[in-house]
Amino acid sequence: MTAVLEKPTRQLTPKEPRQWKGPAVFVAVAIIALVVMPLVLEPFRLGLLAKYLCYAIVALGIGLAWGQGGMLTLGQGVFFGLGGYAMGMYLKLNDAGGDLPDFMVWSGVEDLPALWAPFGNPVFALAMVVVVPLVVAVLLGTLVFRQRVRGAYFAILTQALAAAMVILLVGQQGLTGGTNGLTNFFDFFGNDVAAESTQRGLYLTVAIVLGVLYLAAWQLVRSRFGRLLLAVRDGEDRVRFLGYNPATVKTITFAISAVMAGIAGALFVPVVGIISPALLGVVPSLELVVAVAVGGRFALAGAVLGAVVMGYAKTYFSEELPDAWLYLQGALFILVMTLAPKGIVGVATALRARVRKEASA
Amino acid sequence: MVEGFLNQLPIGLSIGAVLLLIALGLTFTFGQMGVINMAHGEFIMAGAYTAFLLQDFAGRSAVLVALPVAFVVAGLMGLLLERLAIRHFYGRPLDTLLLTWGVSLVLQQVARDLFGAPNVQVLSPTWLQGAIGPMPYNRLFILALAVGSVVAIWLYMNRSAQGRRMQAVMQNRQLAATSGINTGRVDQRTFFIGSGLAGIAGVALTLIGPVGPTLGTYYIVDAFLVVVAGGLGQLRGAVIAAAALGLLNSYAEFWTNASLAKVIVFAAIIAFLQFRPQGLFVLRSRALT
């Protein structure tokens, strides 16, 4: 790893010309998200957008791990769930005010399980939102990447982890609320969680967190580390021959994407009011990967865009044409993979290039 | 305790047998073509529904009639998928995974529209009711089915010209092509056989449970784990890994509980990969990746 962090002794690449278009678009989108949307959208629709932005945070992590690092992770739902449950456990204990959370009483649990006790402390719970996904991802990443298990093997393993996680959560009824998960929250750090003002505040929080994480990810991608990550994606063995350890690079990136998913899960809980196994299994994890592919996996913006677009598409079609949604989703996916593997961003770039060509001709 | 231990044995072995039937197709398509076929689960479902439909004509012995029919039905579905979509994706395994997942979503919805969302039941033949000691006949039948399939596949691979061509393509595609083997034809055949085996697995599953549109999704993840643990394109590896996974699953469920069992299996696989990152058996090769 030390090799990664060493300062470059010489400038290997010429300085890039200062870009202004990217930042300008970012600022414009930020203004729309933070100022226009809360004014235009009614509370219900704003809540939906907040939910999609939570998914966009997970998608950002997938874009980093898969688009930049070539690690197809089909188990981001696991980390989303770990963050979500950490937050949900705190909210449950806070609502119970010293008693047992309601679902434990229903499942006949008499004493608060030891696992739950520390989550009464908000600082501990918030720390766990980051720490638990981080530890799980570092552990899994180290064990898997160290042995050069990669590509499809890694994808299959992460998917198996998501499947195992769901079965574990469903089975431990008294500890996790089983299939129902954790729900019926009332108080969120002193505010009524269902109140319009709280929900608006939550929306703004989600949007700001997404913006900050996006900038961080963008900075990471254009750093030396980001270049190394791309190199690992395109030729892992060559990178190893150059004296770097690809396993470390991959583990770090995988851990970052896991932490992003954890944070998204924690924000999701107060926004939507529930965290349950159905939200984090194999299918939801894959749906997010699909969203990233649709948006364009090779650009971070594509990942975010894809999550929001697919979120809206899912809501719209499952309201209007519930039976057709699965056909549409499947067909869209087949079409995107065959015709436009670079997603919406890829199509947009190609179109722009064509327009420019015609203009210059 | 001893009785419970014995009762778990047929369950574990028959689950392993079903996993093996499913994993055989996956391991060959993965090993030979680098295709991760998520729609493989839906071929299982197609096989199971074939048995369900044939029940109207063949009555309680539908299972026997269904075996060859399901093999052909699922095989043709696989062939169609390979011809229409997958062959454009060779060399991009992760993309095939996502593409075939789209296909699997569509096929599930087709099944829902054709047969309804609720599960249906296939009546098992009367001659499969009963047991020898702790071993029920129906699970014994599944075991026999798996053993028969493995023998047939082994004979095909080692005793037929087509099978030897298949092995050649799996070991070195370019060299096989330069020796005059039509690799595209070999790919199609592998896909047909692999998907057909999934259809047989589907028929087997009707003996131990109800049939529904999402039947395949329960087994596909475990079947992929068999492929990972057994090694790509390895018949021996798949047999050992499937038996081990089936038994580990059922005993872990027995000693702890169903919810912990999957986690234990997952941890066991990760631990196993520390010693054998490429799975039990590896195709020796001088290629770097």
Image: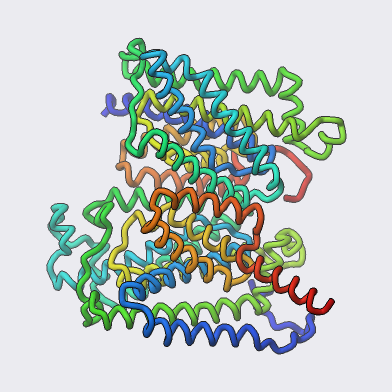
Query: Which residue is at the far top?
Result: B127
Q: Is residue B133 above or below residue A125?
A: above
* Residue A248 in sight here: no
Q: Nearer the viewer, residue A162 or B271?
A: A162
Q: Position of residue A41 (x, y in %)?
A: 37, 78
Quarter containing the N terminus of chain B:
top left
Question: Splitting the image into 4 quarters, where does residue A26 fall?
Answer: bottom right
Among the 4 quarters of the image, the one containing residue B234: top right
Residue A44, picture quadrant: bottom left
Name which residue lies at 15% across and 64% down.
A100
Residue B60 horizontal side relative to residue A15, left or right: left
Asked if residue B3 is positioned above or below residue A134 in the image, the reply reads above
The picture places residue B183, in percent across and down from the top left corner, at 77, 34
Name the foreground residue: A142 vs B162. Answer: B162
At x 53%, y 86%, the residue is A28
| Residue drawn at point x = 34 percent, y = 79 percent | A202
Q: Look at the picture and state if B40 lies above or below A288.
A: above
Q: Position of residue A274 (x, y in %)?
A: 29, 64
Res. B166 in view: yes
Question: In this orientation, which residue lies closer to the viewer: B7 or A89?
Answer: A89
Q: Residue at x 70, y 46 (%)?
A: B88
How many numbered marks, from 0 up?
0
Horizontal and vertical percent position of residue B277: 60, 47
Left or right, B91 with reference to A200 = right
User: Quick check: A248 left or right of B271?
Assistant: right
Is A213 situated above or below B283?
Answer: below
The colour mode here is: rainbow
